[in-house]
Amino acid sequence: MNSYQKPPQISYYQMTRKRIRSSMEQVYGITTFGLKFFRYVFVPPYEWGQVRKHFDELGAKSLPLLTIVGLIMGLILALQSRPTLDRFGAGGFLPAMLALTIVRELGPVITALIVAGRVSSGIGAEVGSMKVTEQIDALEVSAVDPFNYLVVTRVLACAIILPMLTAYVDFLAIFGGYVSEWISSNSSMQLYFNEVVQSLRFYDVLPGIGKTIAFGYIIGVIGAYQGFNTSRGTEGVGRAATSAVVLASLNIIFLDMVIIQLTLLFLGPG
């Protein structure tokens, strides 16, 4: 008599249900992990030395890539928009269009996605490596709170540095638009930037820069969460880094959609 038995087959419904349940558990875990940050951030000891260290690691080292992306983004947007605006006799509105598009939407979102790709994966891999090598357990044995030391400092650094990086990218993108205008039509710098300044209002700049604080919070929390929940050695570290980038990018896009709707609701389309 053959004692071999076929393993039970998992139906498509069961597999889908399992994936949905796993996703919901992950959403709940990230939410509770993120809310825990607000309970720790106002409680001493304050690790300002670690926050300053992460400013350099997470923010300053992103400047070369952001510089290139900012300039090219402004150049491409100006080059692509000029023929269309000229077709409708609206070429004079190009500086205003560039400024509003970049400050309101493109600058914050592109900056956040680039930083998420570099920083969130780095946080996930670094914290994950500490988890699998039991360095987090060593911190607890040394009477150091690992959440305060590893998570709060990184999330604070991301939330503080991202608005600064966004303002930097916004300026470079607008300047890149001027370079395109100067090459194509020898436009005056003074006239170009006068039109840029006149087109921008406080309520254009505030939501664009302000929402990057939330983007930085998302990048730091998701990267740290994936690192803290790493398992299965080096394979788990790689999975944590990849998952951190994907989840952070998706959450940034979703939150941006929500903020746009709230901005239109309370401040109006103008």
Image (cartoon, rainbow, N blue to C red):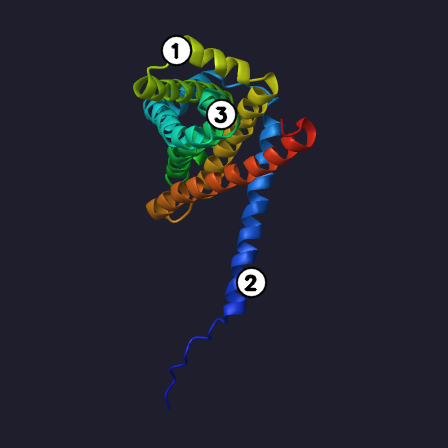
Residue at the image position 54 percent from the left and 18 percent from the top: 199
Query: Which of these two is toward me, 223 or 59?
Result: 59
Label 2 crowding class (10 Å Cα cut-off): few <14, some 14-19, many 20+?
few
Q: Is residue 201 at all visible to an observer of this figure?
A: yes
Q: Indicate which disc, 1 or 2, sits on the residue closer to the N terminus.
A: 2
Looking at the image, which residue is at 52% across and 31% down? 215
Q: Is residue 39 left or right of residue 224?
A: right
- Determine the residue located farthest toward the bottom in the rendered image: 1
Question: Image quarter for residue 265?
Answer: top right
Circle on res. 97: 3
On the rendered structure, is 173 left or right of 207? left
Distance between mark 1 and mark 3 Cα atoms: 16 Å
Badge 3 crowding class, 10 Å Cα cut-off, few under 14, some 14 to 19, many 20 or more, is some
CA gap between label 1 and label 2 equals: 59 Å
Task: Please state the horizontal and vertical placement of residue 179, each as a whole percent of the image.
Answer: 34, 18
Q: Disc 3 and disc 2: Cα gap in Å?
A: 46 Å
Q: Quadrant of residue 266?
A: top right
Q: Secondary structure at mark 3?
A: helix
Name the mark nearer the viewer: 3 or 2: 3
Task: Specify the amino acid type for callout 2.
Answer: Arg
Q: Which residue is label 1 attached to?
A: 189
Q: Secondary structure at mark 2?
A: helix
Q: Return the residue nearer the eye: 101 or 214.
A: 101
Q: Which residue is mark 2?
A: 17
Q: Are marks 3 and 2 in contact (CB under 8 Å)?
A: no
- Residue 134 image point, x, y percent: 40, 38
Marks 1 and 3 close (CB-CB < 8 Å):
no
N-term mark: 3 or 2: 2
Q: Give amino acid for label 3.
A: Met
